[in-house]
Amino acid sequence: MTPWKLVNTPEEAGLSSRAMLDLLDAAKAADIQLHSVMVIKDDKLAVNMHFAPHTQKTPHICYSVSKPFTSAAAGFAVAEGLLRWDDRVIDVLCDSAPANPDPWLAQVTLHHLLSMSSGLNQKSDQMNHVFDPDGAEEDWAKNTLAWGCDAQPGSIFRYNSHGSYLISCMVQKATGMTVLDYLMPRLFEPLGIARPRWDMSPQGVCCGGWGLYLPCEDIAKFGVCLLQEGKWNGTQVLPQEWLDKAIKEHIATNTVPRHREWSEGYGYHLWRSTNNRFRGDGSNGQFCIVSRKQNMIVAATADTQNLTGEHDLFDEFIFNEARWTPASAEDQQTLLRRVASLHI
């Protein structure tokens, strides 16, 4: 059961059909290929747009929107006393650690991995994770750690998806279950999310930083749970301590030469955003954006390299309150017809 009410038009949730029409036109003009956009505002499904053959229930590759789910798994493990934020990676993953780790690698903790401040050598995030030609299976964790660190942990933001894989390994080592199996009764089942696909390493570990497939509706469910302080239909699901840490800035990202939305700081596998929002985002335009101030979330799937342009679309036509003026009845009907015929 979803915790949002169905409405006929965006106006019933305080948004504008005209703005949604303009968003669709702007996306087409910028060649931004959206697959799904869902907006829940004030507990109402204000926008529900899907481009055939995609529907709100079609599993979609999440790319790095996988990361907040891995982070949540670590949060559950800490809440249950199975891990600590200051646990050292080389202690938990001792079987994969180098025999003589460099001094900085010896300092890397779960906290550093979650906040993308581990200092892991940048080359550790550039490996091709495939079976090697002679048939031997590559040990992802061992190979990642073998690169060591080229920056002191906690000193610099450095995005590293293989660091997220190490978190998945730590959770599995501590719990005896994959991140997927561990999350099923704790998060996915309470939110009404059917068992999803999550790609695995040759060692039988969920990729962690990528590889999760979810329908847009399920991304929206997670966003609503984040919006509601970790609650789902009034019941606390997500650990409060983890959520508080996940949305807090732990490391500055304003040195990253990117769009303003990537310059607001980083939490525990959640990005800080402008106007005090926070989000998960993934390659090719996957988003789960939460605005507590506006009591609203945006979930989106897409296939575009223009992530900055997609952000600009949402900023201008969804989060921009100047665009919330109710549209005419004609525009409302036009949007309904257009949404019904959307396709790639």
Image (tube, rainbow, N blue to C red):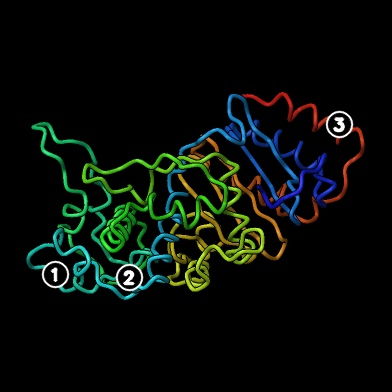
Q: For residue 289, what is the image quadrant?
A: bottom right
Q: Is residue 34 visible?
A: no
Mark 2 or 3, nearer chain start: 2
| Residue type indicated by callout 2 | Leu
Label 3 element class: helix
Residue 21 at x, y = what percent?
76, 36
Q: For the residues marked 2 and 3, what is the alpha-carbon distance in whole angstroms?
A: 53 Å
- Name the residue at 80% across, 31% down: 336
Residue 308 at x, y = what percent?
55, 47
Q: For the residues marked 3 and 1, what is the alpha-carbon distance in whole angstroms?
A: 64 Å
| Image disc number at residue 83 | 2
Count neighbours of disc 2 (C-alpha within 10 A) and say few if under 14, some if 14 to 19, many if 20 or more. Answer: many
- Name the residue at 72% across, 61% down: 294
Count neighbours of disc 1 (C-alpha within 10 A) and say few if under 14, some if 14 to 19, many if 20 or more. Answer: some
Mark 2 or 1, nearer chain start: 2
- Name the residue at 80% across, 33% down: 335
Task: Name the foreground residue: 339 vs 3.
Answer: 3
Which residue corresponds to mark 1? 102
Q: Is residue 91 left or right of residue 293?
A: left
- Name the residue at 50% across, 60% down: 271
Which residue corresponds to mark 3? 333
